[in-house]
Image: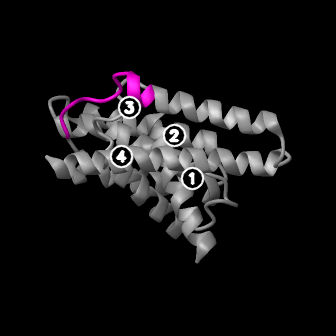
Amino acid sequence: MKKNKAIRTFTLATVLIIQIVFLLLIAKNNYDTNNFFAIIAILLISAVVLFGHSYLDLHHSKHDYEKLSVVIWVPIGAVACHILNFNYGLGSVLSAGIIGTLGSLVPIFNKQSSYLKKLPGAIYCGVFVGMSSNTITPTIGFVLSAGAIAGLFFLLSKNLFIGIGGKLGTMAFLGVFIVYLINLIA
């Protein structure tokens, strides 16, 4: 039980830290470092995120993880969207729409299958990774790595942020951002 709580805390802390780092990078690039308004805005946004986590019921009390057989579809959706986007020149929105629609049709093959009902969310999480700009995600290897890390967050966040919009996009953002930082450092 302590292991599950530690994993849950690690996942939430990672999301929070990356969001704050991203906000700081935005402020650094767009505002003068001595700009009082930018500092206050970042502090207020950070306080709202902390307040939301502390006082709102965003999570189930039980610790549950998504199955690996479902999570494997996150990088598959990412690569499929990236290929349509860049190899076939369809653009990110149309590519995401095609892969997302095909993913949403998967449960039709067997309406009784609980496994197939879980795939559209995983595929669509990967689609958000595949939508990234070619300057950020230049290679299939990068997209596959970002999709795998987004899949890891998808696996760990099954009972987190319940009922909050943007969960799949946040998981995809975390995957792309972490792989981008690793490439930047390496």
**Residue, disc 3:** 161
Q: Is residue 70 visible?
A: no
Magenta range is 52-63
Q: Nearer the viewer, mark 4 or mark 3?
A: 3
The residue lying toward the viewer, choosing from 72 and 150, is 150
Q: Is residue 54 magenta?
A: yes
Residue 9: give its label: none
Q: Is residue 138 magenta?
A: no
Question: Tag 4's secondary structure?
Answer: helix
Q: Looking at numbered disc 4 in the image, what kind of residue is underneath it?
A: Phe
Residue 98: give its label: 2
**Residue, disc 1:** 84
**Sooner in the amino-acid sequence: mark 4 or mark 1:** 1
Q: Looking at numbered disc 3 in the image, what kind of residue is underneath it?
A: Phe
**Residue, disc 4:** 154
- Image point (59%, 63%), residue name: 180
- Image point (60%, 73%), residue name: 185
Q: CA distance from mark 2 to mark 3?
A: 27 Å
Q: Looking at numbered disc 1 in the image, what kind of residue is underneath it?
A: Leu
Count neighbours of disc 4 (C-alpha within 10 A) and say few if under 14, some if 14 to 19, many if 20 or more: many
